Image (cartoon, helix red, strand yellow):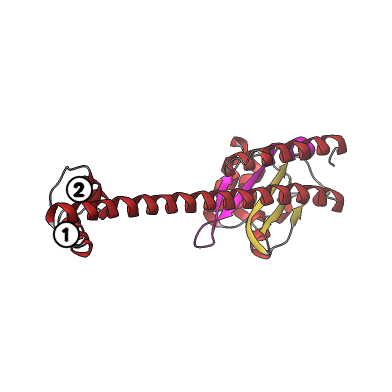
Amino acid sequence: MYDARTYVAVVDRLVTVAEEAPEDGVIFRELSSALTAAFDIVGASVLIPRDDDSLEVASVPTELAAIEKCQAEFQRGPGCDAYRGAQIVAVADIARAHQRWPRFVDVAVRAGIVGVAAFPLFRGGDAMGSLVLYSTAPQAWSATDLDAARVLARLATAQLFQSDRLRKMKQLSEQLEHALESRIVIEQAKGVLAATDNVDTEAAFERIRQHARRHRTSVREVARAVVEHRVRL
C-alpha cells in the first residue's frame, strides 16, 4: 500500500521538522501530510484527550472535518476505540462497521470514506490520543502498512513529548525569573521605606502588603510604585 521511496522522504521531512521544535499544530499537520503522501489515503486526523478523558479533534483536513466532528461529539468511532483500547483498529470497508459506530459510519460513507485505520498515540506507557487514517477505497491494511504508519505516529508523538517538555521548561524559567524580579523589587521597596520612615524591614513589608490588600493589587506592583516614588505608605 505505501510507497517505500516516498516513505523515506516523508520520514526525513518529519525529522527535519522535529529539529525545528514546532508547535503541536505544525507537528500534527506535518504528520497528516506525511501519511497522505506515503499511503494511498485522502487524509489523517489526530484526536487528543480533554481533562475528562473524552477526545477532541486536534488536527483534521477540511474534507474530513464533518467525520471527526461526529466522532468527537458522540465519542464513538475507530479513533475513540483505538485510544481507549490502546490498540490499532483497522477496517477495510467502514460500511460493514455500521452496527459498531452507526453515526460515525453514516457520516463517513456520505463523505466517500471506505477504508479506515486508527492508531493509539503513546507517551511512555500512557495513551495520549489517537491517529486516524482515511481512504476512499477498500484497504486490506497489511501488517507492513500498519507498522509503517505506526512508526510515523511514534515519531510525531516523540516530538510532541519533547515539545511539551521544552514548553514546560520555558514556563518554569519564566516563572522563576518573574519570582526573582518580584523579590528584588520588594527588597528595594523595603529598603526605601526603612530609610525614609525609619522602620525595620519587617514593618516596611507589612505596610506594602496592607496597601496592596486595600487597593486590591499585587505586592509587587505596590513595591514597584514605592521604588519609583509614585506612592507613599
Look at the image and give the residue range highlighted in magenta: 31-59
Q: Mark 1 highlights which residue?
A: 207
Q: Position of residue 45 (x, y in %)?
A: 64, 45
- Name the residue: 23% across, 55% down: 190
- Name the residue: 54% across, 56% down: 74
Is mark 1 in CB contact (under 8 Å) with mark 2?
Answer: no
Q: Mark 2 highlights which residue?
A: 226
The answer to which of 215 and 29 lies nearer the viewer is 215
Q: Amino acid at mark 1?
A: Arg
The answer to which of 49 and 69 lies nearer the viewer is 49
User: Element type at marker 1?
Assistant: helix
Q: Amino acid at mark 2?
A: Val
Tell me if residue 149 comes above or below residue 208 in the rendering: above
Q: Is residue 82 at all visible to an observer of this figure?
A: yes
Residue 216 falls within the magenta-colored stretch? no
**Circle 1 crowding by C-alpha within 10 Å: few under 14, some 14–19, many from 20:** some
**Circle 2 crowding by C-alpha within 10 Å: few under 14, some 14–19, many from 20:** many
Q: Is residue 14 left or right of residue 227?
A: right
- Name the residue: 85% across, 53% down: 143
